[in-house]
Image: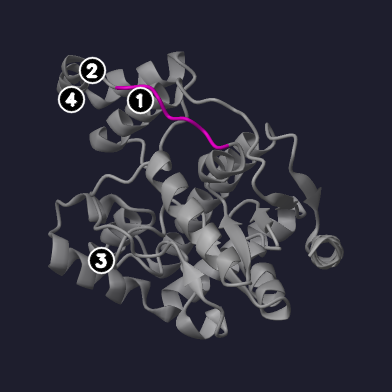
Amino acid sequence: MRNNTLVIITGPTASGKTSLAIKLAKLFDGEIISADSRAVYKDINIASAKPTTKDQEGVVHWGFDLVEPGERFTAADFKEYAYAKIDDILDRGKIPFLVGGTGLYIDAVLYDYDFGGEVDDNFRKDLNQRTVEYLQNYIFKNEIEMPENNKNKRYLVRSIEKSISEKGKSCKKHNNYNNIVVGITTNREELRENIFKRNENFFNSGIIEEYKKVEQKYGSNSEAMTANAYPLIRKFLNGELDKKELIDKMSVQDWRLAKRQMTFMKRNKDIMWLDLKDAEQFIISKIKKCIKSCKRSG
């Protein structure tokens, strides 16, 4: 009998979920599926916090480098991709770990969302003719999640379109997997410190060089250059920010992202919120029970 265990680890950026997942995947011969909407884009590596080959410690990772920057990739696309990978991993007798901070990706897989809404072409055309200020106000008034880059018209339009497409989703819990769902919680000051140290490491690991390569490949006006810390790096290269100011502003940006992630995730009542140590023990215990139950049934 196939062991249908699916381990889901979520939480805010820089909370330690990836390191925990790698540790557990090594322990239980698992593979990791990234649930991060930024990591699906090719070439944007440091800026999207993808673990390096060394950091992956030999554990197979999926969900990275799926599309070019600017190419459309929706939560519906991710759900189909994730289900295919989960079943493939289970069929090979391994345990899949779905890990990331994009709450909609997690929910789409956990509840098998049916994304039924469609955006009218005329409405999309009207949105694209509106000002950034108008789009920001529309998002605020309609209680739509504000995109990370809220000054980019394309990002604003996409957020509005996404909210419309999600209106048709159903929230029926997926019953094909034995879901172990854990969220990583951490002290606010500790999380702030983790974010700052990570951004220092990003700077020392070559995020400036990455920016230059992406700019050369896709062009300075491409959507790739609006991603994550890139607009701040542009200011650094233009002499508008020094190193300390850049890292500070990157950290503030990530802190705001972490707060948005927590606001979204706290709505999910199926997530068991634990600190890293307790989460590790909880998941280990649950996986062992699932394996034992599967052996008895087989």
Q: Nearer the viewer, mark 2 or mark 4?
A: 2
Front-lying residue, 177 or 273: 177
Q: Which residue has dot 3 on it?
A: 237
CA distance for labels 1 and 4: 11 Å
What amino acid is labelled 4 in the image?
A: Asn
- Camera-side residue: 214 or 230? 214
Would you name the residue on which mark 2 appears?
120
Q: Nearer the viewer, mark 3 or mark 4?
A: 4
Q: SS class of the residue under badge 1?
A: helix
User: How many angstroms separate mark 1 from mark 2 (CA)?
Assistant: 12 Å
Work out whether residue 22 or residue 127 is closer to the camera in this orientation and state it.
22
Secondary structure mostly seen in magenta is loop
User: Residue at the location (78% across, 65% down)?
Assistant: 298
In this figure, which residue is indicated by the disc labeled 1?
160
Mark closer to the chain start, 1 or 3: 1
Sort mark 3 into few (<14), some (14-19) or many (20+) by Cα contacts within 10 Å. few
Residue range of the region highlighted in magenta in the rendering: 112-118
**Earlier residue among tags 1 and 4:** 4
Circle 2 Cα neighbour tier, 10 Å, few/some/many (<14 / 14–19 / ≥20): few
Asked if labels 3 and 1 touch by Cβ distance under 8 angstroms, the answer is no
Foreground: disc 1 or disc 2: 2
Q: Amino acid at mark 3?
A: Leu
Q: Which badge, 2 or 3, comes first in the chain's sequence?
A: 2
The part of the image, by quadrant, that contains residue 294 is: bottom right
Q: Position of residue 209 (x, y in %)?
A: 28, 76
Q: Nearer the viewer, mark 1 or mark 3?
A: 1
Q: Could you tell whether 196 is left or right of 3 in the image? A: left
Q: x%, y% of residue 284?
A: 82, 67
Q: Is residue 220 magenta?
A: no
The residue beneath circle 4 is: 128
